[in-house]
């Protein structure tokens, strides 16, 4: 069982930025694909961004150009830089295996974008 801790969620104004962090209990190189997911009110959980061991990235159309996923292998940490935040980005954000998650690895971190 992989253990991880997501952090960085906060209340921000539209147009603001946040950086989410996911500290993983194992080498992230042992996991072929890591991703950030979100679940917004009234919606199903969706994959926002993912990154493979070799550095290939994918993004949901709704965040393309605004969000950037990255990783530090030395720190066993996956990041999500979120810029130009919109109210529609409000959700609980989860770090998990990609491109299909386990729904078991973390508790999530709340991101709220509101004026």
Image: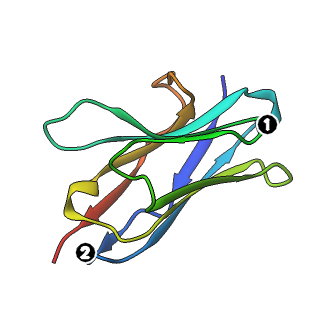
Q: Quadrant of residue 11?
A: bottom left
Q: Tell which of 29 and 23 is nearer to you.
A: 29
Q: Nearer the viewer, mark 1 or mark 2?
A: 1
The residue under the point 17% across, 43% down is: 41
Q: CA distance from mark 1 to mark 2?
A: 33 Å
The residue under the point 40% across, 41% down is: 60
Q: Is residue 81 visible?
A: yes
Q: What is the x, y in percent for residue 25?
A: 73, 39
87 left or right of 92 in image: left
Residue under numbered circle 2 = 14
1 left or right of 13 in image: right
Residue under numbered circle 1 = 54
Q: How many marks?
A: 2
Check disc 1: other Cα within 10 Å, few if <14, some if 14-19, many if 20+: few
Name, please, the residue furthest toward the right. Answer: 74
Q: Tell which of 36 and 9 is nearer to you.
A: 36
The residue under the point 25% across, 67% down is: 113
Please determine whether, in this image, residue 94 is positioned above or below residue 65. above
Please determine whether, in this image, residue 11 is positioned above or below residue 51. below
Q: Which mark identifies residue 24?
A: none
Q: What is the x, y in percent for residue 39?
A: 29, 39
Please determine whether, in this image, residue 31 is positioned above or below residue 28. above
Q: What is the x, y in percent for residue 110?
A: 34, 55
15 left or right of 29 in image: left
The residue under the point 68% across, 39% down is: 56
Please determine whether, in this image, residue 64 is positioned above or below residue 42. below
């Amino acid at each position: 069982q992989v253990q991880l801790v997501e952090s960085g969620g906060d209340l921000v104004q539209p147009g603001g930025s946040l950086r989410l962090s996911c500290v993983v209990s194992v080498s992230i190189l042992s996991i072929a694909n890591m991703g950030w997911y979100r679940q917004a009110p009234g919606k199903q959980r969706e994959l926002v961004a993912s990154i493979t061991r070799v550095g290939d990235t994918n993004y949901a159309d709704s965040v393309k150009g605004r969000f950037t996923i990255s990783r530090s292998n030395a720190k066993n940490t996956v990041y999500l830089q979120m810029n130009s935040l919109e109210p529609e980005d409000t959700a609980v954000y989860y770090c998990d295996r990609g491109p299909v998650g386990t729904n078991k690895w973390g508790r999530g971190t709340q991101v709220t974008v509101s004026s």
